[in-house]
Amino acid sequence: MSSEPRPGLPFLPGCSFRDPTKTSFHRSQTLGYKNGFAFSRLPTVGFGGERLYVNQPTQAELDELCYTGPTLTYGEAKKITPSGFVPAHVAFDKKVLKFDAYFQEDVPLSTEEHYRIRQVGIYYYLEDDTISVMEPVVKNCGFRQGTFIRRHRVPKNALGDPYHWKDLNRGINITMYGRTYRIVDCDPFTQVFLESQGIELNPPEKMVSDPYMERRQMPLRMYITPSDFDQLKQFLTYDKQVLRFYAMWDNTNSMFGENRPFIIHYYLADDTVEVREVHEPNDGRDPFPVFIRRQRLPKTFVDKKKTFPSCVMEISDQEVLEWFTAKDFAVGKPTTLYGRTFFIYDCDEFTRNFYRDKFGITDFQPVEIKKKPPEEVPQVIPPYNGYGFLEDSLQNCYSLFPKPPRKDIIKMLENDHKVLRYQVALESPNPVDEKRRFILSYFLSNDMISIYEPPVRNSGIIGGKYLGKTRVAKPGSTTDNPVYYGPSDLTIGSTIEVFGHRFIITDADEHVLNYMESNAESFPASTLQSMRDHFRSRQVVEETAKSNVPAPGTSIQELDELIERVQDELKLHNYLNFSSIREALLRCDKDQSGFLNKAKFLSICDSLKVPTSAALVNKLIDLCTYGGDQINYRDFLRALPL
């Protein structure tokens, strides 16, 4: 069915005939770009997507072919290839004609100007024949400037015909929207374009300026300064030029007075003076920088009567004979300002150059200001009250929030769990204290001493801890320079005083001798030799006991002597629980015979950490052995301290 409407049929709903397969009715694009250049092409498809036969020759071309015969003599003539089609918006893209013009505007409500000349620029865009009028912006002009006529086709008559570039020229008037513009000149591109199109340009004219703007650019008044002492000339010459002096106010004669630094500024523009205070960190003063505000300072006052109320009246020119000037300030001289004497000891480089050029002064040697050192208040340490360690008590005197005293961490790590043990006896006139024995432990990690008294049954004295871990000072040491007991002071037979109690060192552990020999450079030779002599005599007794082992029939006297020596040996081992040893041995003897198997006896001693490897203890076990495998444990229990 054809898509064309049938003639004679009414064009009513339901009576229209169209092809339902045709859906595209837009116009084909004929402009394209290739490799950055624009080119035109002929459309191949029409409205509705129907193909156009554009390559078929027209009737005129067919007629020309009929009457054109072949040229035999010269051959066929070369046809000139027609130039490609270039649209106007491509050919004239970004090409604008610019004309300089002005118009006159009436100013009815002003007494200073009757009209105003406003300069504008007329821009003609060749790509679409549009025109815009722009006025350059001038600061402080008092009226709005910028775009007068936006870019569009401006009509030139009542018929609506737009302006064309052929209508524009220099030296003519054009009217747009009721305002007449006088074109006076154009730019070089506009001149070249119009001349290339065969238009003869009029000579350029001079741009007319606004008379009111010219009058504003002229100075308001012109006069000659009558003298060199004019204040305006002084302000214009010395504006922002300031003399700077460094001064010191000595106020040490008053209560809580001190030397306070100040900076004196002298402003050359108006002969005013300002004094500023220099603040230092932690000076104890409020941070107010200005000490004397900027003002003219009087130097000499008029003699006035005593009844003149100067305390409530402001100072004026009538009360002052002379004001401070730049001549009154000099380096190395005192200056009195409002009753305070400031000593100027230095100035900056600009001030030196000013005085050198203005007054010819060349001596600017700065004066060295020595501040008086504050009096050192000796710190009096109160006497030690006996509570806590001496170092902890001293920290309360040094700070409001005391810190713990510093410890020797390296010494603590190197000597951790290293203890020197000594047997000491109490020196007392009381006969009860003669047989009391103590174990003194010296801790090498922190130089502290503790004393422990092994409990003795039926002695009437409760044993246990006698002195906790603490540092013991030597007799005669002061709180300022305390001297504490050290390992070199603990020798056999020496006496140490512990908080009013005197102890005599009677014996020591073998570890003490081993430690002294491994660190011989830290101990005096006499201390090391006394310890060696003590252990040598003790070793001789042990070797004699090993070489002369008596038979089972040993006398009771020899056994008692050996028991006494074993008791002294076991007292040094304060970790032994002698009551537990007795209970364990008695519990194993079920038949109450008083004898135990030697292997079982030794296993019990090992479980209770009895030092059976010691020479004296081993000697005692041998004396208590009967038949080779039986031990009289009751004789061994006699050697345990009560």
Image (cartoon, rainbow, N blue to C red):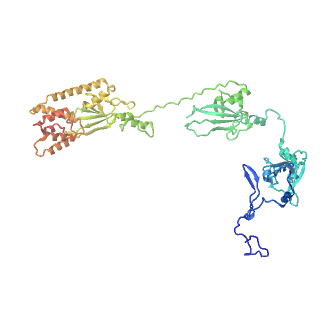
Q: Is residue 96 visible?
A: yes
Residue 516 drawn above or below residue 144: above
In which image quadrant can residue 25 be found?
A: bottom right
Location of residue 230 in the rendering, given as x and y in whole percent from the top left corner:
79, 35
Left-right relation of 149 to 278? right
In which image quadrant can residue 428 be found?
A: top left
Residue 31 drawn above or below residue 278: below
The quadrant of the rendering that contains the N terminus is: bottom right
Q: Is residue 92 visible?
A: no
Location of residue 308 in the rendering, given as x and y in whole percent from the top left corner:
70, 38
Left-right relation of 153 to 548? right
Residue 499 drawn above or below residue 87: above
Q: Nearer the viewer, residue 607 or 122?
A: 122
Which residue is depicted at the point 84% across and 38% down? 222
Location of residue 445 in the rendering, given as x and y in whole percent from the top left corner:
34, 34
Q: Nearer the viewer, residue 181 or 114?
A: 181
Q: How many marks are shown on the rendered structure?
A: 0
In which image quadrant can residue 634 be found?
A: top left
Location of residue 468 in the rendering, given as x and y in whole percent from the top left corner:
30, 38
Q: Residue furthest front?
A: 72
Which residue is depicted at the point 15% across and 44% down? 586
Q: Nearer the viewer, residue 155 or 479?
A: 155
The quadrant of the rendering that contains the C terminus is: top left
